[in-house]
Amino acid sequence: MSSSKDASEVDPKLLEILVCPLTKGPLRYDRARQELVSDQARLAYPIRDGIPIMLVDEARALGDDEGAPPRPGPAAA
C-alpha cells in the first residue's frame, strides 16, 4: 500500500545532515543494500521503510572486502 519510491528512497536533504553517531564523520548511501555506510567506523546503518536506523547496536560491521568505492582518478601505470 505504500509507494515503492517512498519506501526505498531516503530524502537527499536528510542524507546531507546525517553523520555517523560513533565518529561524527560522513556517511555514504548504499542504494543497493539500503544502508548508510560509515567508512571511518566500518559500520553500515540499515534503512528500514525509508528511515535510517542510526543506532550503533543496529549497525552491521563492514567485511574486509567492503570499503569506500574506488575514487575516480588517473589510472595506475
Image: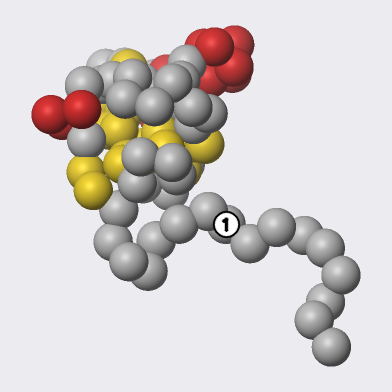
Q: Is 43 positioned to the left or the right of 27 in the image?
A: left
Corner quadrant of residue 74: bottom right
Q: Name the foreground residue: 28 vs 23.
A: 23
Indicate the position of residue 63 as horizontal and vertical percent values: 28, 61
**Residue visible at 35% across and 40% down in the picture:** 41
Q: Name the foreground residue: 67 vs 29.
A: 67
Indicate the position of residue 39 as horizontal and vertical percent values: 45, 44
Q: Give the amino acid at mark 1.
A: Pro
Indicate the position of residue 28 as horizontal and vertical percent values: 52, 36
- Compared with 32, 15 (above or below) is above
Corner quadrant of residue 53: top left
| Structure colour scheme | secondary structure
Give neighbour class at mark 1: few <14, some 14-19, many 20+ (Cα, 10 Å): few
**Residue visible at 49% across and 27% down in the picture:** 25
Q: How many marks?
A: 1
Q: Is 77 positioned to the left or the right of 33 in the image?
A: right
**Residue visible at 57% across and 57% down in the picture:** 69
Looking at the rendered image, the quarter that the C terminus falls into is bottom right
Q: Residue furthest left?
A: 57
Residue at label 1?
69
**Residue visible at 21% across and 43% down in the picture:** 60
Indicate the position of residue 73 as horizontal and vertical percent values: 82, 63
Corner quadrant of residue 23: top left
Q: Secondary structure at mark 1?
A: loop
